[in-house]
Image (tube, grey):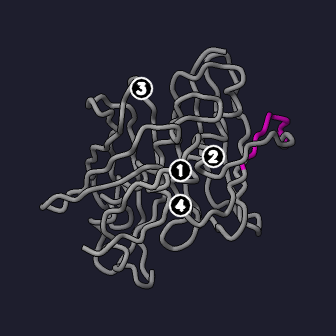
Amino acid sequence: MRESTHTGPEPRLGITWTEDADGELTWHQIVADQVVAPEGRFALGGLAVLVDSALGSENHKRRPGGTWTVTTELRLDLLATPRAGSAGLGVRAAHLGDDGHCLTTRGEVLDDDGRVLAAGLVKSMEIRGIEGADEYDEEPPWESALVPGTLAEVLCLDLREAAPGPTGARTVEGVIAPEPSLANPIGALHGGVFAAAAETVGAALFSHERQVSSSSLDVRYVRQIPLVGPVTVRAEALHDGRSWGIAHVETRDERGRVCATATVTVYGDR
């Protein structure tokens, strides 16, 4: 087998995969600081690249001939946090079907003792016209190249308070540096990286004043997110109640067009 040349966000986040004789893929992610938010909580966003890649691969291998797939929707719900001393996470996937336009797979993120930590769902659109698409399917397994640091540090994400939006709601921005290893195979920002950044930035609206016990993330990808320069991810509070909070998150291109949006929900009393 030839040596892998993959330099995307998966190895950067400690995510690897193996393939058995039947062609089934098993995904694994190291549990380290890259699943920890800047404020020290376990970050749901730290699972986003794992879920996008693992469930997206189930869609991708079932695509019709002559097509490629891109993630259009990603849903992730945190159910529990890893137990103390957990070494790694895995994914159990179940492909749901293909309606002729989109493929859908749901799955669960498991602790190394088999406990379900999160539930996810990925929808992938079938598209044509990607040059050399079949070459990506030949990529062999890669080695983990985990970058040390919290999730924000691994994502090259700089958090900062921003001016309130039109409604006057509290707003936080995160700026992702144009690090090439955060790109997908066609050079745009990896969808899982945006999802991870969106959860980090959205939850940062509330983390200063509430103990987050669980959270959910719902992402829609409208168009490719250019990575030719810094990518700004902006979150605004939609609801900041006593027991839960909701944030709207988005990123736009240089023409002001929305590239991706997310809703981040956090639960926990102030």
Is residue 176 left or right of 16 when viewed as pictured? Answer: right
Judged from the image, the secondary structure of the residue bearing numbered disc 2 is helix
| Mark 2, other Cα within 10 Å: few <14 / some 14–19 / many ≥20 | some
Which of the two discs, 1 and 2, sits closer to the camera? Answer: 1
For residue 137: magenta? Answer: no
Most foreground residue, 97 or 269: 269
Q: Position of residue 50 (x, y in %)?
A: 42, 49
Residue type at numbered disc 4: His
Residue type at numbered disc 3: Ala
| Mark 3, other Cα within 10 Å: few <14 / some 14–19 / many ≥20 | some
The Cα atoms of the two marked residues, 1 and 4, are separated by 17 Å
For residue 171: magenta? Answer: yes
Q: Are marks 3 and 1 in contact (CB under 8 Å)?
A: no
Give the farthest residue toward the left: 21
Which of the two discs, 3 and 2, sits closer to the camera? Answer: 2
Q: Which residue is drawn at 67% across and 63% down?
A: 178
Task: Decide which of tag 1 and tag 2 comes sooner along the chain.
Answer: 1
Q: Give the range drawn in magenta.
A: 166-174
Q: Residue at x 39, y 79 (%)?
A: 133
Residue type at numbered disc 1: Val
Task: Decide which of tag 2 and tag 4 comes sooner along the chain.
Answer: 2
Q: Are marks 3 and 2 in contact (CB under 8 Å)?
A: no
Dividing the image into 4 quarters, which one contains the C terminus?
A: top right
| Mark 1, other Cα within 10 Å: few <14 / some 14–19 / many ≥20 | some
Which of the two discs, 3 and 1, sits closer to the camera? Answer: 1
Give the residue pinned by disc 4: 190
